[in-house]
Image (spheres, rainbow, N blue to C red):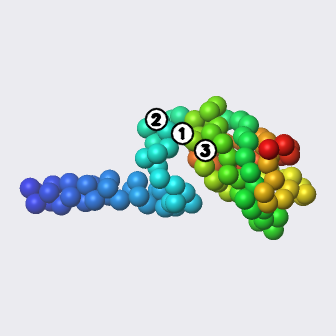
C-alpha cells in the first residue's frame, strides 16, 4: 500500500508540473513570457470572467479568410492586459474590410478569459 501511495504522489507531482506548461502551449500564447504579464498572479476566477474593453494599437496582420486580425496593442488597463501582440477573431468578417497592416486603430474587445473578440474597429491618427 505504501508503494501505491508513493506512485500516486509521484504521478500527481509530474501532472502538476506539466499542466501549466501544456495549458500555456495550447492557448496559442506560447511565445509570450507569462512571468512578465500582470495576469500571471491573477486569481483564476478573474481570468475566466468576460468583459468588454477598448484597446489602441497597430495592425500587424489581417486575415479575412479566417476572420482574424493581429494587433500590437498598448496595455489595456481595464482588463489587466499588458502591451503585447495578439491575434483576435473578428465578431463579423465585415469589420476587417478596409483595415490595412500598419494602420493605427482603436478597437472594441469582448474578452473571455485570455481570448478576445474584436467587436468594432476605428482608425486613429498616430
Q: CA distance from mark 1 to mark 2?
A: 7 Å
Query: Looking at this rendering, what residue extends furthest in the top direction?
Result: 78
Q: Residue furthest bottom?
A: 65
Q: Is residue 16 left or right of residue 55?
A: left
Query: Residue at coordinates 84% horizontally, 59% vertically from top-left?
Result: 100
Q: Position of residue 7 (x, y in %)?
A: 18, 61
Of the numbered discs 1 and 3, the one sitting upstream in the chain is: 1
Which residue is painted at 43% across and 47% down in the image?
35
Q: How many marks?
A: 3
Q: Which residue is mark 3?
A: 83
Does residue 21 sit above or below 109 in this rendering? below
Mark 1 vs 2: CB contact within 8 A: yes
Q: Residue under circle 1?
A: 47
| Residue 22 falls left or right of residue 102 | left
Q: Secondary structure at mark 3?
A: loop
Disc ID at residue 37: none
- Spatial separation of the CA atoms under disc 1 and disc 3: 17 Å
Q: How many residues crowd mark 1 within 10 Å: few (<14), some (14–19), many (20+)?
A: some
| Residue 112 x %, y % | 63, 43
Label 1 sits on a secondary structure element that is helix
- Mark 3 or mark 2: whose residue is earlier in sequence: 2
Report the disc number at residue 43: 2
From the image, state whether disc 1 or disc 3 is nearer to you.
Answer: 3
* Mark 3 or 2: the one toward you: 3
Task: Determine the residue positioned at 52% across, 55% down.
Answer: 32
Amino acid at each position: 500500500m505504501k508503494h501505491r501511495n508513493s506512485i500516486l504522489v509521484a504521478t500527481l507531482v509530474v501532472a502538476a508540473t506539466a499542466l501549466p506548461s501544456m495549458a500555456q502551449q495550447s492557448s496559442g500564447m506560447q511565445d509570450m513570457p507569462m512571468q512578465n504579464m500582470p495576469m500571471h498572479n491573477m486569481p483564476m476566477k478573474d481570468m475566466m470572467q468576460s468583459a468588454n474593453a477598448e484597446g489602441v494599437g497597430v495592425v500587424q496582420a489581417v486575415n479575412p479568410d479566417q476572420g482574424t486580425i493581429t494587433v500590437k496593442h498598448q496595455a489595456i488597463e481595464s482588463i489587466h492586459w499588458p502591451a503585447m501582440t495578439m491575434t483576435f477573431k473578428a465578431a463579423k468578417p465585415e469589420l476587417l474590410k478596409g483595415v490595412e497592416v500598419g494602420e493605427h486603430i482603436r478597437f472594441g474587445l469582448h474578452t473571455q478569459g485570455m481570448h478576445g473578440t474584436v467587436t468594432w474597429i476605428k482608425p486613429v491618427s498616430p
